[in-house]
Image (cartoon, rainbow, N blue to C red):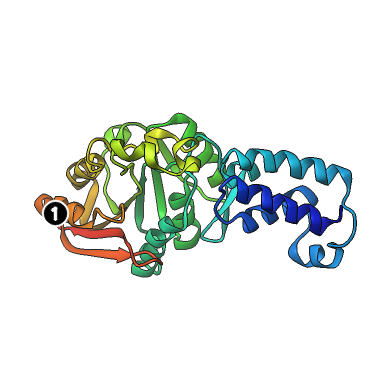
Amino acid sequence: MTCRERLTAGTARLRRAGVPEADWDAFCLWEAASGMDRGRYLMEQNEEPDPGWVRSFEQMLEKREKRVPLQHILGTTEFLGLTFRVNRDVLVPRPDTEVLAEQVLKDFPDGKGRRLLDMCTGSGCLAVGLAALGHFQVTACDLSGAALAVARENADKNGCKISFYQGDLFEALPPQKFDVIVSNPPYIPNGELSGLMPEVRDFDPRMALDGREDGLYFYRRLAEEGKEFLASGGRIYWEIGWNQADAVKEILKKAGYLGLRIIPDLAGNDRVVTGEWTC
């Protein structure tokens, strides 16, 4: 079989397994197995591939057929143009979360000298991205020690100096004030977890998904506990579920935050809430 025939067969296997974007995933796996980029593939598609490539491709296809996330198979993913290591200890960074980071960068075109906290950092994608691209002085916190190990590795790989703390939200942090607090907290109501896509339900850590009964537990805590860590005029930026804007906005309004804005994602769904704290 030629390279093209192998890739075509692999794509068909993923389609039969119900994998979304089977064409894209199949090529990403072929690229990882063979080392071919798109240009080289087009030149060599009618040639027979190296048997070692085929074995590697088949092994990766088998995992993806079982709905193991593409990012877990490859071991890395892209976020804000940077490369991040991912595994089952962290939530896979998604384009929706880039909306949050991009809004922070838009509101603070030069973060130099600004102190930023990333709460529930997970893989560290927000912390690292905003340190690298926004030049903020970044602190990051997570309850999971395993997640923090991944975040530290990602900070090192991307040349970022970040202060990491492990604890239940703000409890591990020494008293200090931040200009910006960002968070992509768990926000899925626990009754909806079983209905998530297999890639999320079976492979992302549950503690990074479970927002308790109504999905709003962590927003309530972040709103109240975060006041003690925000400088006057400091801003919060949180990722939210597509149908949570009104509820989260009300939480912030009751807690005394001002200048509330909702930012949509590329699909037009409500995705980020931001507000200002004035002491």
Q: Nearer the viewer, residue 259 or 25?
A: 25
- In terms of image quadrants, where is residue 48? bottom right
- In terms of image quadrants, where is residue 215? top left
Q: Nearer the viewer, residue 176 or 79?
A: 79
Q: Residue at x 45, y 30 (%)?
A: 145
Residue 46 on image: x %, y %: 87, 62
Task: Identify the residue under disc 1.
Answer: 250
Q: Residue at x 41, y 59 (%)?
A: 101
Number of residues whose C-alpha sits closer than 10 Å to that of mark 1, classed few (under 14), some (14–19) or many (20 or more): few
136 relative to 190 in the view: left or right: right
Residue 238 on image: x %, y %: 30, 53
Residue 79 in sight here: yes
Q: Residue at x 36, y 65 (%)?
A: 103
- In terms of image quadrants, where is residue 192? top left
220 relative to 202 in the view: left or right: left
Q: Residue at x 36, y 38 (%)?
A: 193
257 relative to 52 in the view: left or right: left
Does 208 appear above or below 223? Answer: above
Q: Amino acid at mark 1?
A: Glu
Residue 233 on image: x %, y %: 20, 60
Residue 233 in sight here: no
Q: Quadrant of the C terminus?
A: bottom left
Secondary structure at badge 1 equals helix
Does 88 appear above or below 6? Answer: above
Residue 257 on image: x %, y %: 15, 56
Q: Nearer the viewer, residue 17 or 173?
A: 17
